[in-house]
Image: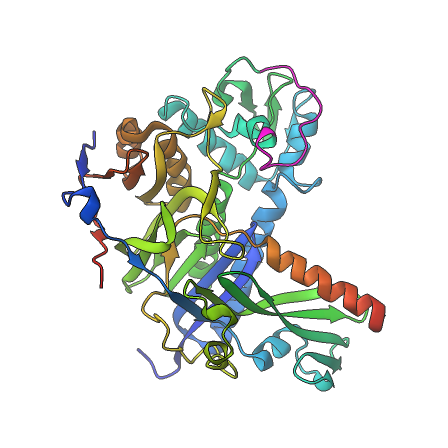
Amino acid sequence: MADWLRWVAPVAAVTSIAAPAYAAQYMSIEEAQKHAFPNASFTEVQAGRIWKAQGGGGGYFYYDHVVGKHLLIDYTVAVGADGRVRRVDILNYRESYGGEVHDASWLAQFVGKSSQSDVRVNSDIRNISGATLSSTHLAEGVKKVLMYHASHFH
Amino acid sequence: MPATSTSLRRAQALLGTFVEIDVSDANQRDAERAVEAAFSVVAEVHRLMSFHEASSDVSRLNRAASNSAVVVHPWTCAVLQMAAEMNRHSAGAFDIGVAPALQRTGQLPGGSEARPSAAGMPSAEAIELLADNHVRFLHPSVLIDLGGIAKGFAVDRAIEELRARGVRSAMVNAGGDLAAFGPEVRMIHIRDPRSPDRLMCQIEVSNRALASSARRFDPFRSADTVDTAVIEPKTQRPAQAAHGATVCAPSCMVADALTKVVMVAGKRAAAPLARFHASAIFVSTDGDIHTTSDWQGVLQHAA
């Protein structure tokens, strides 16, 4: 049977380090467009936010983000010609505890970054385990995009 | 590594959390396809084992299995099998029959209808696994939730899919329940369960699985934790032994389930951990940090 060890450092000296900013880039907007509508051409409907896809079934492509107190997620929603969600992709995920999430200059460093380019924000901290994060807010964001879509394009 | 090799990292919202797949040592086109297929596998596990979706195996079982045997997907059967084994080997600390308690704490929907009490019947005895993927509940009060084990199972299936498609090195991380294979050694940071905006420990993972359980936390709203999602089956109340637990095991399903055992049983989890070839670290509610003697992780030193 396994026996237990207590971590030798006195409790007070067991210092956990702050993770002030953690960022992960997964995809660029262009990559996400190709995933959702392969071989389609895209016409901007609203600058940097909404595109109309022609070819490959056709539909609309949305770029949006959800921002909370310490979390910002960029994501895209592809809506098919039938008004249904074709796919949702997460482009960027950022966790921050120094207030940077709402700071324009901190956010600016992510603009135009693709999944291949690492931003210099604790890029060594790539993999985290611990309390499980809820994705409810992303689902709420997708719902809002769909409501917008239904009232404008469908 | 050949010149065509690439690394790819993708994320999707599945299983109620963020699932991340990281693939290296494959060419771009194959890697994209493999990652897509692995996400599909995770989505399939979600479809089968979600408590929330009316058409899932779990919902069908909860509705009808106490009247007559219900046929489920072989994957659901495999998870129920492991859940029963874990229930027996943990002296009841792991139990998928805690859904009514999760309804009472508001973590699962429903529960307004009064079900007769199962009178402390362990789920391994209350659920009968029959031939050909048939499952029957032996008591009308049995209500199951696979939230404590299905994420780990989904990670294992996604890893299997990536391997089958010729990927040589990958990691799948479903909200902190993760597994990796291949020659690469990956450094995993573990959040401090008392303060999840901080990192407590790091551990190298290669060809193994790691899972954590802690009080719930949503950086979207706050850096503070809220209540624990782990219920102690005997008391039907939130687990009291630990603030958080991380388990390293050969499979992610086993690691996932064992985190609940440690949250509930604390040091008494030593026997089930050894039984499943797993090691663990946990922060007890008195603030001490305990590890099994074979734990390989290193404490995070303040920078």
Q: Is residue B116 magenta?
A: yes
Give the farthest residue toward the left: A8
Q: Is residue B184 above or below residue B270?
A: below
Q: In percent of the image, x 66 and y 57: which residue is there?
A: A140
The quadrant where residue A11 appears: top left
Q: Is residue A18 left or right of residue A80?
A: left
Q: Is residue B55 magenta?
A: no
Camera-nearest residue between B51 and B181: B51
The quadrant where residue B172 appears: bottom left
> Is residue A120 at all visible to an observer of this figure?
yes
> Is residue A153 at all visible to an observer of this figure?
no
Q: Position of residue A90 (x, y in %)?
A: 56, 67
Q: In percent of the image, x 66 and y 28: which residue is there?
A: B111
Q: Position of residue A98 (x, y in %)?
A: 41, 65
The stretch of residues the image draws in magenta is B104-117
Q: Is residue B68 left or right of residue B127?
A: right
> Can you say which quadrant of the picture contains the C terminus of chain A?
bottom right
Q: How many marks?
A: 0
> Can you say which quadrant of the picture contains the N terminus of chain A?
top left
Camera-nearest residue between A145 and A19: A19
Identify the coloring: rainbow
Q: In percent of the image, x 43 and y 29: which residue is there?
A: B94
Q: Is residue B185 above or below residue B117?
A: below
